[in-house]
Image: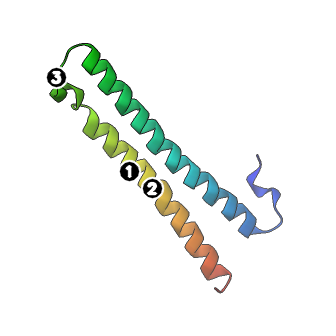
Amino acid sequence: MYLAANDDMTGMFNRIEDILRNAGTMVAVIALLVLGIRMLLSMKRGDGMREAFQGFGMIALAALIIGGATGLASLLIGLGSDIGNGN
């Protein structure tokens, strides 16, 4: 996968935008999987709901920050492409 293989810059930015969008989605899915596994392991040990939700905040915050950053970068690339093409 070579990003600069296209002759024009628009194709390269579209490819980067797709990569960022997919990365943001992947981070959100992985965070949900990690949270689910932590909940299952915590409940299996016999801990209460409080212990099960202790690490929920930090994992969710990290996923939100990473997903938000990739979404914002994707949005800015799309805006720049629209401005550059005169649309």
In the image, 45 versus 15, the foreground residue is: 45
Q: At label 3, which amino acid type do we have?
A: Gly
In the image, 43 versus 81, the foreground residue is: 43
| Residue 62 lies in quadrant | top left
Coordinates of residue 28 in the picture (x, y in percent) = 44, 44
The label on residue 48 is 3
Quick check: 54 left or right of 24? left
Q: Residue farthest to the top?
A: 45
- Circle 2 crowding by C-alpha within 10 Å: few under 14, some 14–19, many from 20: some
Classify mark 3: helix, strand or loop: loop
- Please name the residue shown 72% across and 61% down the image: 12
Q: Which residue corresponds to mark 2? A: 69
Quick check: 4 left or right of 80? right
Coordinates of residue 78 in the picture (x, y in percent) = 58, 70
- Please name the residue shown 43% across and 33% down the image: 33
Residue 40 position (above or below residue 3): above
Sequence-first tag of 3 and 2: 3
Q: Which residue corresponds to mark 1? A: 65
Q: Is mark 2 in CB contact (under 8 Å) with mark 1?
A: yes
The answer for how far apart the CA atoms under marks 2 and 1 are is: 6 Å
- Circle 1 crowding by C-alpha within 10 Å: few under 14, some 14–19, many from 20: few
Classify mark 2: helix, strand or loop: helix
